[in-house]
Amino acid sequence: MASTMLQGVRVVELAGLGPAPFAGMLLADLGAEVVSVRRPGAPATALTRGRPAVELDLKSERGRADLHRLLARADVLTESFRPGVVERLGLGPEDVQARHPRVVFARMTGWGQTGPRALTAGHDLTYIAVTGALHLARGRAPTPAPPANLLGDFGGGGMYLVAAVLAALLRRDRDGVAEVLDVSVLDGTTYLATMLHEYRADGRWSDEPASNRLDMGAPYYDVYRCSDGRFIAVAALEDPFFADLLSLLGIGPLTFDRTEPRCWPLLREMITAAVLRRTRDEWADLAFSRDACVAPVLDLAEAAAEPQVRSRGVLQDREDGRGWWPTLPWGRAAEPASPVVDVDEVVKAWSRD
């Protein structure tokens, strides 16, 4: 059954792309009653599952009136248009909160509502480029290689939006103040790098790619090719885990300090040669119950069969048999369907105590 942790929280989501619908999906999976408002005829997207949709033309007087009917019974409004768009529709924070003072108004953009780039276009790659995060996604490769759009859109954007909304709801219920939230991918991604900024200030992090412990500079925190051409990830940072790694790989006691960067090329050669003796899955089986911090690098399809992933139940089979729905570990996600419903149906449902 779906989670009920946010039962009774009602969210109106003005449909958008990327981080905003991801946040709507997560809020729905946490038990909130979320309705996605999209323009007539707009298709569902990969992130609109688990909540009904209402089709409204917000450029029309009727569409705006119907939106206000929803907001009269809502706790949160989320929108992800460029700055100024909802204001031109007469649906900006001042307009909405004048009529619905208890509605938290959450704005999700790439750059934020202010600043010299605020009105310009961008995507995940654009935003993480200027935060320093893309520079970190390089390792020893000649060019940075970000993990799809997971870092900016969903880590720095969608998750940040959900956290901000939940905090705003707590404040509203405590103080009676409904916040206007200016959430951006730029801000959230920068915040994710807090630890690295501290390391850099302390002289423990270099801007030179692949020269630090956590950016594939250290050979005990890196990815290695196996005999079958596939890869394992090695993350033996602490001494006990590194000792277990050496035992697993059949490497004898070292005669040098493994934390000394001057010794890293030699240690990398030793690990590389050892890993090439077996296939990825052979190493995965050998390392499975050990503390060597070794794991196979799996693709999305393989991940569904990984024992830990399978035991946690975080991938739910799709009804059409074409893959999986990621779910929350403490209860199944909301229904994958995203039906289009009439606004009257939602208003009636939200009118019940």
Image: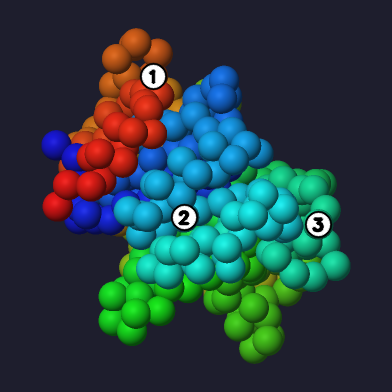
- Counting residues from the start of the chain, the first of labels 2 and 3 encountered is 2
**332 horizontally vs 200: left or right:** left
Circle 1 packing at 10 Å, graded few (<14), some (14-19), many (20+), is some
**Disc number at residue 89?**
none
Task: Residue at 49%, 67% (x, y): give it.
Answer: 97
The answer to whether the residues at label 2 and label 1 have Cβ atoms under 8 Å apart is no
Q: Secondary structure at mark 2?
A: strand
Residue 151 position within the rendered picture, expressed as x and y whole percent measured from the top left: 58, 52
Q: Secondary structure at mark 3?
A: loop
Which-is-in-front pick, marks 3 and 1? 3
Q: Amino acid at mark 3?
A: Leu
In 3D space, how far apart are the residues under numbered discs 2 and 1 (Cα atoms)?
A: 32 Å
Task: Residue at 61%, 74% (x, y): give it.
Answer: 196
Q: Which residue is mark 2?
A: 77
Q: Is residue 103 visible?
A: yes
Residue 279 position within the rendered picture, expressed as x and y whole percent measured from the top left: 45, 28
Residue 146 position within the rendered picture, expressed as x and y whole percent measured from the top left: 66, 46
In 3D space, how far apart are the residues under numbered discs 2 and 3 (Cα atoms)?
A: 21 Å
**Disc number at residue 323?**
1
Task: Residue at 37%, 28% (x, y): give it.
Answer: 342
Q: Is residue 333 visible?
A: no
Please determine whether, in this image, residue 301 is positioned above or below residue 135: above
Q: Amino acid at mark 2?
A: Leu
Q: Which residue is mark 3?
A: 119
Circle 3 packing at 10 Å, graded few (<14), some (14-19), many (20+), is some
